[in-house]
Image: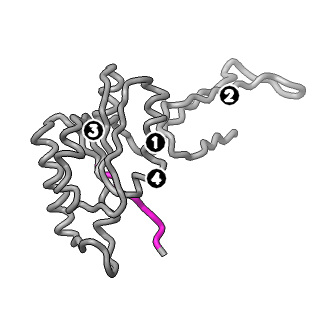
Amino acid sequence: SLEIRPIADRLVESDETVIVTASGGSGYAVDSQNSATVTIQDGPFVVAPTKLINNLMDGKAQTIVVFGTSLTQGGAWSSQMKAGLDAVFPGKTTLLNTTGSGRNSKWGIANVATEVIAKNPDTVFIEFAVNDAVIRTGYQDIITPAQARINLNAIIDAILTAHPNCEIILQVMNPVVD
């Protein structure tokens, strides 16, 4: 027997095929059933494309707004996402980064009209979770989980009222905090 062990990664990939063919050699013979085909499926989950990806696949240009904290402003994920999208869909995406240090969902409510709605987005990534969860002396505001939910719902409602077809993606960071 022969064992095929795929290596797990974080890439979303199409099915892959492995074909093994045996040929005769010294001291043994191979009958007409000399090959086997195995299909390796990607991951245990079915990942449905987002509205953003579906629109890009249909050739529609997309405006993406990232709205949140310094983790998005200074982090690499949004520029890496843009580079990845540009590699597959050249010239079809515009990325607007309206993030900043110390911002939380309370700030988001006060600024969603100018920082998001006015940009006419097709997709918005909202990332306030970490700053909403921060509790330390001298920090701007303490946002309870219940208040964070109210704030995020208000931000989402404002965006969808102005742009009903906009896709909203809640971005949750997982920083290391000492």
Of mark 4 and mark 2, the one earlier in the sequence is 2
Residue 175 colored in magenta in the image: yes
Give the residue pinned by disc 2.
20
> Is 124 situated left or right of 6 in this image?
left
- Dot 2, how many residues are within 10 Å of its Cα: few (below 14), some (14-19), or many (20+)? few
Magenta stretch bounds: 170-177
Q: Is residue 80 above or below residue 111?
A: above
| Main SS of residues in magenta | loop
Give the image location of residue 67, x and y in percent: 30, 49
Whichever of callouts 4 and 3 sits on the residue coming sooner in the sequence is 4
CA gap between label 4 and label 2 equals: 44 Å
Tag 2: amino acid: Val
Q: Picture quarter containing residue 102? A: bottom left
Q: Secondary structure at mark 3?
A: strand
- Residue closest to the eye, 127 or 146: 127
Distance Cα–Cα, label 2 vs label 1: 41 Å
On the image, the x and y values in percent for residue 125 come to 31, 46
137 and 2: which is toward the camera: 137
Residue 75 got which mark?
4
Q: Is there CB contact under 8 Å for labels 4 and 1?
A: no
Q: Work out which quarter of the rendered image holds the N terminus and state it.
A: top right
